[in-house]
Image: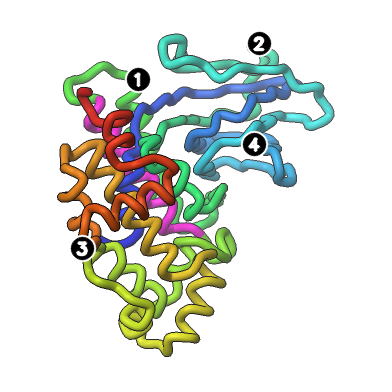
Amino acid sequence: MDALAAVVTLLKPQTLLSKIVRAGGRWGVRYPAYGHPSFALVLNGSCWLAAEGMPAFTLHSGDFILFSAMPGFTLAGDLEVEPKQMVIPRPEDHANEVVHGDPTMEPSVTLIGGGFAFDPINASVLVDLLPKMLHIRATDPAIDGIAPIVGLIKRETSEKRAGQALVLTRLIEIIFVEALRSAPPEIQSTGLLAGLRDAQLAAALQGIHSRTSHPWTLEALARQAGMSRSSFADRFSRVIGMTPLNYLLQWRIAVAKNMLAHEQMTVAEAAFAVGYQSASAFSTAFSRETGRSPKEFVEEHRDGE
C-alpha cells in the first residue's frame, strides 16, 4: 500500500451528508466551523466563497473544492449582502436540497455539497499531513476524474438502495484520494503531498508506510531515499514539516491505535506489529505521545466494549 492510500485507509472517511444547494437573487449565508472534511462541486453558475483565514474567491461552474477540516465560511452571490447565519444540520434533520436567497428567482448558482467524518482515533494527527483546502478548477483536466464520482454520490444519497452505506464509504474514499493526487503542486508546499512529489522522499515514505515494523534508522531511511544522511534529514524536515524519525514515530503510533481500537490486538501484538521489540518500550512511547497508556486507550476506544 502506498503512503497516500495508507493514510486515507487509517482516516476511514465515512458518514456522508450530501445535498443540492440552489441560490438566487441577492443572497449570502454564513456557516460556523464544521471541523470535518467537506466538498462541493459547482453544477452551474458561480458564487463567492470566503472561508476563515483565507481570502474570498469565486467558485465557477465545474469547480470542485475540498476542505480536510471545514472552517467557518460565507457563501454568497454578493459579498456586500449581510449573510444569514446558518447552523450545521444534524444527520437526522438533513434535507436533500436547500434554497438560499429568493426562491422565486432563477438560481444564479447550483452546487452539490457534502460533508463526512474521519475516524477520530487518528484524525487529529493525520489531517495535519494534508492540505487544508484543494480547489480544482473546471479547466483542470483532473476534474474529469472527480465529477463522475460526485454524480454517483448524488445518486446514492438521493435513493435508498441495498448496500448504500458500503457504496458511499467507497465513493468517499475514491473521491478523497482522487482529489489529493490531482492537487496542483502549489496547493501544498509542505506536508505529505509535497513529500510524495519528491521522488527521493517518496521512496522513504513508501518504506515507512509499507514496512512499518522494519527496524528503520535515519541511515536506513536515507539509503532508501538514495541520499546522504544529512541531506535526507534536512530535506525531509523542510518538506514534510517534521524529522524523519518523528514522522516514523507518529505513523507507528497511528497504526497501533487503529490496531488496538479496531482489530482486537493485544498491546504486545500491536507493539511488535509496528516495530517495537518489547511491549514496555512501546507502552512508554505510546504514553508519551498520546498522554495515556495503551491499556487506558483500549478501555476507552475498543469496539464493542
**Of circles 3 and 2, which is in front?**
3
What SS does tag 1 mark?
A: helix
Q: Which mark is residue 104?
A: 2
| Residue at 35 percent of width and 43 percent of height | 11
**Of circles 3 and 4, which is in front?**
3
Instruction: Tell me the crowding category of disc 2: few under 14, some 14 to 19, or many 20 or more residues within 10 angstroms, Cα based.
Output: few
Compared with 178, 237 (above or below) is: below
Disc 1 target residue: 158
Disc 3 target residue: 277
Is residue 149 visible in the rendered image? The answer is no
Which callout, 4 or 2, points at the residue further toward the start of the chain?
A: 4
Instruction: Tell me the crowding category of disc 4: few under 14, some 14 to 19, or many 20 or more residues within 10 angstroms, Cα based.
Output: many
Which callout, 1 or 3, points at the residue further toward the start of the chain?
A: 1
Q: Position of residue 229 (x, y in %)?
A: 43, 86
Which callout, 4 or 1, points at the residue further toward the start of the chain?
A: 4
Image quadrant occupied by the C terminus: top left
Q: Which residues are magenta?
A: 165-183
